[in-house]
Amino acid sequence: MTTTLTDGTVDWSLSYQRVDHTVDPALTRSDGTTLAAYSGVLKSGETATVSIPDSAISSSTSSVTTTLTDGSVDWSLGWTRVNHTVDPALTRSDGSTLAAYSGILTGDETATVAIPDAAISPSTSSVTTTLTDGTVDWTLAWDQTDHTVDPALTLPDGTVLASYSGVLESGQTATVDIPDAAVSSATDSFTTTATGGSVDWTLDYRRVDYTENPTVSLPDGTTVASVPGLLEPGETATTALNGALSTTTSSLDVQTASATVGVAAQFREVARTDGLTLSVNGNTVSHTGTIGDGETVALDVNESWLQPGVNTVDVSLATLSTDAPTSEVNLDYSHTLSDRVSVTYDGEAFSERYNITRSYASEQQNATLTIPHAGNVLSIRDLDYRIDGGGWQAIPQETATLDGTTLRIDVSALAGEPIPESTTIDVRSTASKVQVDGGSISVLQSTAIGFDLDSRIRLESWSDEASISLGATPQGSLVHYADEESYSAEDDYASIDSDGAQRLYLPTAVAGSEMTIKNLPVEVIAETNTVELRVPDSSNATNIGLVVSGGPVIGDAWTARYVGGTEGTYYGIVGENGDRLARSQAPDVMTVSRDDVGLVFVEGTQPPSEDEPAGAGAALFSTVGGPTFLPLLVIFGAIGMIGVAGRRPEQSRETVAGLADGLGGLVAMVPVVGEAVAGPIEGLVTSLGNASISIGESEVAVGGIAVIAAVAAEQANLYSVGPQTAAIGATATVAVGSFIALQRTDSFSLQVWGTIVGATTLVALQTLGQTDLISAVVDSDAFLLIALGAAVLAWRAISAWRASEQAENAPPKITIDAGSSNDGDDSP
C-alpha cells in the first residue's frame, strides 16, 4: 500500500481478518488430461459442480490430481457406472480375423461389420470373440452359397488330365488346357473330383488323326520297315530297308493300326553283274546267275581254245536298259603255256586300265599284243612298257595302231626281232572314256596317244538335253566341238563353267547320228557362272573362231589362253568388226570383260606400241565406241564438271543462276501450268547447282565421288580394269595427289614433284614389264647419265628442303633503310 496526503505526515495501523479462498480449481489425470476445471474464486464454504465428459473417463482411470491457483479445495466425485465394449472382434481358430470393430460401443449401441467372402470357407465351423474391455453379444448373418473347390478331371488310372486350383463360385467358369500327350485314341471315360461342391464340365477338342504303328511289307508278307508308336500329322520317320528290295520287287504293302500314312521309298539303282560270258578266240564259257559285290567266280577254259600268236579274250555281261548303271567286272585272266601271260583289267567311270605281263619261254618272232578297249573309249591317255623289270618308257607312236577301239602293239619292235628267250615285257594302257548324261555312245575310231583329238563316235541313244563330258581326255581343258556331222549341227555348243568343266551339247542330234569329236588349241574358262561356245564350220586349229554367248547369266567375264602359240608372241581376241577385245603374250591368259560378244577370232597381233605399254591401249580403250562408252562419258563428265565448277565458285553460281532463270522463263511459256511450276523448277535447279558447286570446292569430296563411281562402274561391267589400266590409274593418282599435297603445304618444287612421279612411273613399268626393267637400265650405256641426273635432282630437292627449313627456323629480322629527307617529307 502507498500513503498519499496533501501535506504533513501520517501514521496508521491496519487491522484485518484472514479469509482463505480457492482460485481456479481443477482435476487432472495422471497423463495430464484435464477431467474438470472451475475458472474463478470460490469463497470459504462456497461449492461448484462441474461435469466430466464421458470420453474423459475410461475403465483404466484410477487416480486424479488436484490443481489450483491459490487456496485449497475439497472435492467429491459422483458418477454413474456404465459398461462399454471396446474393440470387439471375431477370429477363427487359426487366428485370422473374420470381422473387427475399432472403438467403443456404449450401452445398447450396435455395429454391423461385413465378413469378406474369402474369409469364410466350407471348413469354417467356429469363431472366437476378442475385445479390449467389456462384453459383447453378436449375431452372425450369412447367405449360403455353394462353391466348387479344386475341381479336376482324372482318367480311370488316376492320371490327372486337367485341374483348377481354387474356388469357383456359383456361375463362374474356368478353362483349362488338356495336354495333347494326356489323351490317346484309347481314352473314353473321365472322373470328376472336387474338394467341395459340385462341378459341371464341357470338353472341347479338335480331332487329330495320328498314324499308329505303320509298317511296310513285301507282297509275301515279309515286313521290311516299321515305325512303332505314333506319327503326328506332318511328322516323318526314316528307316532302312537293309537290302530287302530285289530286282523282282514291284510293289510294297502298307499297313497302320489307325489313320493313313504316305510312303516314299528312296533307293540307289545298282546294276548287279548278271549273265557273265567269257569268250576265248570265239569259244565261250558262262556263269549262270548273279555275281555279288566282292564275290569272285572262276571260269575254266579248254586248252584247245588257245592258239599260237594272238589270243583274243572278250568279256560280256547281260544287256541292260539304256538308262541303267553300267555293269562292271574285274577280270584276272591267266593260263599255263610255254609263254606266261597275266592280264589285269580295271574299269572306272572315266578310265579303262590294262596291265599285261607276258614272259616268253622261247625265242619269238613277229610278236604282237592286242588290247580290246571298251566301246566308249575316246582316246588312249597313257601307253607305257618295260622289259625284264626295267624302267617304264612310252611306247612309240609307230609301234601302236588303233582299229576302232582295239589297240595293237608291235612287241617285236619294242623288244627286238627276234625276241630273246625268257624275255618278260610289261605293257600298261590307260584309255579315256567319256561320261554321257541322257544317252549312250559308241566310239567308232579312237585317237592314238600323242595325237590331237580326232575320234569318230555314234550316238546309240540320245535326248534333247543329253551331253558329253570330255574332261577326262588328255586334252580335256581345250575347247571341244563336233565336226563332219551326219545331222544339221548349227545348234551344237560347249558349256564351260568357272572350274573349267566342259560339256558338249548336241540338241539336234538323234540316235544313230555320227560325228567326229575334235578340239581347238585354246582354253576357255568362265570367271563366274558359265560361258557357251559355238564353233563355226570354217574354224580349225589354224583359224580359230568362236561364237561366244552367256549361259543362264549374261554379261560375265571370261578368259582364254592360246596353247598353240609361240611363247613370247602376242596374240589377241578380235571381234567380228575388227575391235581387239583382249591381248596377251603367250602363254598368258587373255581376259574379256563380257560374254555376249558374238563371233570372235584368236589370232596373232602386234606387240604394244611404245605409247601403249604392255597392251594398255587394248585394256584401257576397249570400251570406246562400245555400248558402255556413253554411260561412262556421262558419269565421269558430270564429275569433272563438278570439279571445274568448284574451282571458280562465284562465277559458277552466277552461271547456275542464269541457267535456272532461263529455264524458268522457258517453262513459264507453257500454257496453263507453266507459270505455276516455273518457280519451283527454277529453285530446284538453283539448289542442285549450288550444292554441286559446294561439293566441287572440296577436292577430297570430288575425289571420293570419282573413286566410288569408278568402282561402281567396274562392278556393273561398264568397263574392265586390267593390270595396265590399274598401273596408269595409280600413277596418275600419285602424280595429282602429290602435286596437290605439295601445293597445300607450300612445299612444292619441280624437283621434288618430278622425283615422286618418276619413281612411281618406274615402279609401274617394272611391275608390268615382261623383263627386269631395272636390270636392263643398269646394264645399259646410259645408266651413268641417268644416275648423274638422278643425283642432281636429289641434290636440288635436298637444297630446296634445307632452304625452306632455314627460312622457317630463322629469327625475325628488321631492316631499316635510312634514306634522305626532301622538303620535310619523310620517306622510308
Image (cartoon, grey):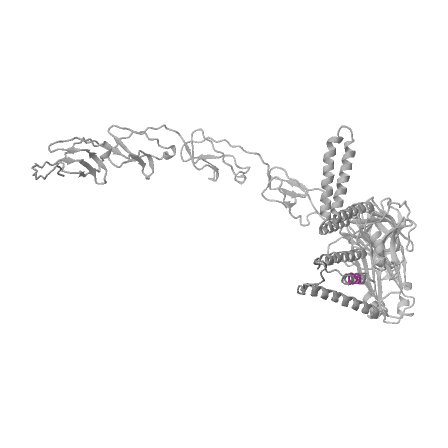
Q: Nearer the viewer, residue 140 or 194?
A: 140
Vertically, is 126 above or below 721? above
Quarter of image, res 197 = top left
Q: Position of residue 613 (x, y in %)?
A: 84, 59
Magenta-tinted stretch: 757-762
Quarter of image, res 138 = top left
Q: Position of residue 221 (x, y in %)?
A: 66, 43
Image quadrant where one finds the N terminus: top left
Q: Position of residue 463 (x, y in %)?
A: 83, 44
Residue at image position (76%, 56%) is 736
Q: Nearer the viewer, residue 492 or 632?
A: 632
Image quadrant where one finds the C terminus: bottom right
State yes or no: residue 678 in magenta. no
Vertically, is 251 above or below 287? above
Residue at image position (83%, 44%) is 464
Residue 319 in view in this figure:
no
In-image side of 664 versus 580 (left or right) = left
Quarter of image, res 681 = top right
* Extreme-front residue of the structure: 823
Residue 529 in view in this figure:
yes
Q: Nearer the viewer, residue 407 or 808?
A: 808
Vertically, is 24 above or below 728? above
In-image side of 500 versus 520 (left or right) = left
